[in-house]
Image (cartoon, rainbow, N blue to C red):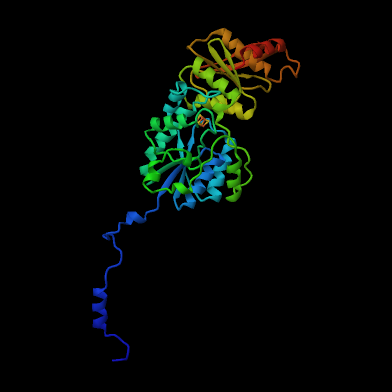
Amino acid sequence: MVKGKIPIFRRLMRKREEPKKYSSTSKISKAKFKKTKALVLVSGGLDSLLVVKLLQNQGIEVEAVYFATHFDNTKNLRWLDFLINNMNVKINKMNVEPDYLDMLKKPKYGYGKNMNPCIDCHAYMLRKTKRLLKERDAQIIATGEVLDERPMSQTMKALDIVEKEAGLKNAVLRPLSAKLLPKTVYEIQGLVDREKLLDIHGRQRTRQLELAKKYGIEGFNSPAGGCLLTEKEFAKKVKDLIEKGKSFDFDDVELLKIGRHFRFKECKIIVGRNEYENDKIIQLAKDDDLLFEAVSIPSPVTLLRIKERSTNSEYINAAALLTACYSDAARQGINELEIEYRSSKKDSTIIAEVDLKKCKEFKEKYKV
Ligand code: SF4
């Protein structure tokens, strides 16, 4: 036998006797080593990005959850690109369902300064995120909320209401203010180290901006604004839709984002401002709507929506007048203009007077 060499038989025996390394039946469960995963609600603001960083720094895997509400403020969406490109975070994009509109019509906790039902909206999103936990194999739900940063939805009382309404009592982690809030189940269970969480409070952005600098998140100085429901002009149209419109759907919400809007008695008139809006109006029109357009010169597309189904000539005249008002007629010195109007059933034409004084009066009186 060559010196130092172990016979095959003995090597085989030794192999057999060797204790097994970890296996699926190991007493130390694989689950013990599974990385904790958090779902972080992102709205497009710096705060939620900081939460992603804070949790990642604790070794927690993070996935983002973004709710597309149809009221999204596109200004905020650049943050989502930042998340994808620089922080290696998967984004779960969730579309709100028609029940979101039901909530918007009658929010249990009311509206903020405009038509923003922030408390109900947060509860809605958290409720839906709770259902996502299992699917994404995650254990934690976290948000970028900061205590008292926003007057309606981020007071201690509001945070508490939101948790209860979402069925997540003590189960919403708010890492930026965690040390000022009651302990969450995640901290109690040891999934999150409370010591590494923060105690930011109020509307001052100093600490967030310092953290942003530290983490290399640059170029975003202001906090994210709210969604379109927080904007005064847009909110007026939403209010009008809720109070005077028929039941509405997401197509109606899309219509609110384009055109000039007029409420004339029992009807709604929307006038396109450019080619894009004209096309969009045609695309979003319903079967009962009438569409107006000048026959021979460039003009907007105008949509007439009547509350109760009727072909009231007063409404048709009003829509034709507005089409003429916003057409090239006045510039071309035309006093009367042929306007075509179409329904799903037939095409008709009407002659509209091009009267700038009447146009002005109508706009002032009926503009939403
Ligand atoms: S600002 Fe808009 S999206 Fe944000 S919570 Fe309020 S209603 Fe919801």
Q: Which residue is drawn at 23% across and 78% down?
A: 13
Q: How many marks?
A: 0
Q: Is residue 265 visible?
A: yes
Question: Which quarter of the picture shows residue 355?
Answer: top right
Q: Position of residue 34 (x, y in %)?
A: 37, 54
The quadrant in which the C terminus is found is top right
Q: Nearer the viewer, residue 101 or 187?
A: 187
Q: Position of residue 295 (x, y in %)?
A: 64, 19
Q: Which of 213 and 332 is in front in this view?
A: 213
The quadrant in which the N terminus is found is bottom left
In this rendering, is residue 317 above or below 83?
above
Q: Is residue 234 left or right of residue 118?
A: right
Q: Where is residue 121 in the image (x, y as percent from the top left)?
A: 46, 29
Q: Can residue 92 be seen in this view?
A: no
Q: Residue at x 48, y 27 (%)?
A: 250
Q: Where is residue 153 in the image (x, y as percent from the top left)?
A: 50, 30
Q: In this view, does 305 lie to the left or right of 362?
A: left
Q: Residue at x 61, y 10 (%)?
A: 317
In this rendering, is residue 305 above or below 37?
above
Q: Which of 117 and 250 is in front in this view?
A: 117
